[in-house]
Image: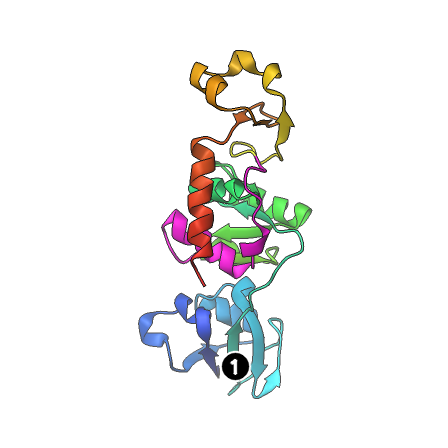
């Protein structure tokens, strides 16, 4: 039997039991065990792990743990993907709507199976957003984030901060139903689809080329403004 001591820093402590935080965690193991395997056995998904130090030297998730190793794990730094594209698990429908409302590319269905999500992530190189840390531990997941809050508005603020999205918001840009970019459309082309008051008070319209949903600066727009103001008030 071999033994190593693991230290977790910063946000990685969120994945530990309260009695394990702020102290070394002794891990007993047999055979050839990677840092990834042992860290995840303690609850920390590998996409959340950044710098790794082993006995004062740089290591990796694939480094094999040796007897009496001191392993220090730091959270991955906040990154700004050049073209953020997300995949949300089946419990995050309201977060998906919020992100689409702000113009971000989000795939979401309420009946995704884990295997299907893993295939999409591999094929399209999307960032997984989930509260299921076990899903985040799948080997094929290279980029992902485990949401801490159960509240959609708080989840949105987490994602904005984690991926540096604050200055990349493009409201009124994406369909809330099916994620497609919207296109402008002349009012005269959709008059028969508009309610009387909408025809009277609004002149600028957008349409989803996929599902044909029509958008104007009504209630959705006001909710966008509220979200943007809330985001802007956060440091």
Q: Write the residue at 49% across / 71% down.
A: 39
Q: Position of residue 22 (x, y in %)?
A: 38, 80
- Quarter of the view holding residue 157: bottom left
Residues 82 and 121: in front is: 82
**In this view of the protein, can residue 132 be seen by the observer?**
no
- Quarter of the view holding residue 94: top left
Look at the numbered disc 1 and give the secondary structure of its residue: strand
Q: Write the residue at 50% across / 60% down.
A: 161
Q: Position of residue 181 (x, y in %)?
A: 62, 35
The residue pinned by badge 1 equals 71
Q: Position of residue 49 (x, y in %)?
A: 54, 69
The residue positioned farthest toward the top in the image shown: 192
Residues 54 and 26: in front is: 54
Q: Give above or below for 52 relative to 136.
A: below
Q: Is residue 60 left or right of residue 110?
A: right
Q: Which residues are magenta?
A: 147-174
Residues 156 and 61: in front is: 156
Q: Is residue 41 left or right of residue 80?
A: left
């Amino acid at each position: 039997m071999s033994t190593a001591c693991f230290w977790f820093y910063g946000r990685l402590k969120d994945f530990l039991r309260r009695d394990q935080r702020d102290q070394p965690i002794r891990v007993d193991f047999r055979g050839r065990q990677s840092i990834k395997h042992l860290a995840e056995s303690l609850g920390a998904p590998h996409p959340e792990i950044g710098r790794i130090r082993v006995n004062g030297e740089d290591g990796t998730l694939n480094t094999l743990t040796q007897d009496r190793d001191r392993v220090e794990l730091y959270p991955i730094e906040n990154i700004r993907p050049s073209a953020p594209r997300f995949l949300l698990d089946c419990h995050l429908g309201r977060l998906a709507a919020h992100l689409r409302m702000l113009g971000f590319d989000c795939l979401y269905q309420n009946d995704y199976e884990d295997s299907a999500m893993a295939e999409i992530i591999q094929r399209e190189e999307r960032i997984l957003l989930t509260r299921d840390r076990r899903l985040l531990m799948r080997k094929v997941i290279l980029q992902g984030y485990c949401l801490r809050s159960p509240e959609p508005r708080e989840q949105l603020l987490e994602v904005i901060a984690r991926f540096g999205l604050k200055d990349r918001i493009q409201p009124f840009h994406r369909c809330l139903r099916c994620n497609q970019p919207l296109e402008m459309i002349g009012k005269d082309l959709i008059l028969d689809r508009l309610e009387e008051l909408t025809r009277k008070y609004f002149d600028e319209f957008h349409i989803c080329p996929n599902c044909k949903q029509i958008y104007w600066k009504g209630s959705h727009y006001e909710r966008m403004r509220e979200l943007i103001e809330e985001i802007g008030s956060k440091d």
